[in-house]
């Protein structure tokens, strides 16, 4: 987190015990060194606007959706992130990678699961509900 006040500016880390106040010089070296050029190009070490925060959230959401196989949903999240901040190079990269993944054919190979006859199948107490299909969700 970052505080930009009228008289002071500092970074806060609350992931450990208590609260650590660290300056920009610390983050120029940790967790890996970054150059001044990278700081300018990638917009590091600056406070985010509301649109930029939303873009970061949508990018993280898209990454989670990708990991869960929801490629169509992830593409939509990356598109929205890009629309929020089209000047961020990372947004363009994530969106183009998601489009490329969706363009690739999906091959599903089903392996028969071994069935142990000594273990009865679990009953499903919940009836299957029919939900409208999302046209952007991958099968």
Image (tube, rainbow, N blue to C red):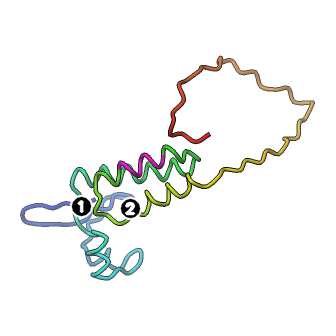
Magenta-drawn stretch contains 91: no
Residue bounds of the magenta highlight? 74-80
**Residue lying at the far right of the rendered structure:** 117
Image quarter in which the N terminus is found: bottom left
Residue at position x 32%, y 74% in the image: 27
**Residue lying at the far left of the rendered structure:** 6
**Element carrying mark 1:** strand
Query: Cα distance, mark 2 to mark 1?
Result: 25 Å
From the image, tell me which residue sits under label 1: 2
Q: For this view, does 18 lie left or right of residue 101?
A: left
Q: Earlier in the sequence, mark 2 or mark 1?
A: 1
Q: For this view, does 102 lie left or right of residue 122?
A: left
Of residue 14 and residue 63, the one placed in the foreground of this image is: 63
Q: Are marks 2 and 1 in contact (CB under 8 Å)?
A: no
**Where on the picture, by quarter, is residue 2?**
bottom left
Residue at position x 28%, y 56% in the image: 85
Residue at position x 92%, y 31% in the image: 117
From the image, tell me which residue sits under label 2: 92
Figure check: 77 above or below 46: above
**Whole-percent x, y for residue 127 in the image:** 65, 17
**Whole-percent x, y for residue 79 in the image:** 39, 50
Residue 103 got which mark? none
């Amino acid at each position: 987190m970052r505080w930009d006040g009228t008289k002071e500016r500092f970074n806060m880390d609350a992931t450990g015990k208590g609260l650590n106040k660290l300056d920009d010089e610390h983050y120029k070296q940790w967790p890996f060194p970054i150059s001044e050029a990278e700081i300018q190009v990638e917009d590091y070490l600056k406070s985010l606007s509301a649109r930029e925060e939303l873009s970061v959230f949508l990018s993280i959401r898209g990454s989670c959706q990708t990991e869960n196989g929801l490629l169509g949903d992830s593409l939509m999240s990356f598109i929205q992130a890009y629309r929020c901040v089209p000047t961020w190079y990372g947004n363009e990269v994530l969106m183009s990678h998601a489009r490329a993944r969706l363009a690739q054919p999906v091959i599903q190979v089903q392996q028969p699961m071994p069935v142990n006859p000594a273990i009865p199948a679990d009953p499903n107490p919940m009836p299957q509900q029919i939900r409208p299909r999302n046209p952007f969700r991958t099968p």
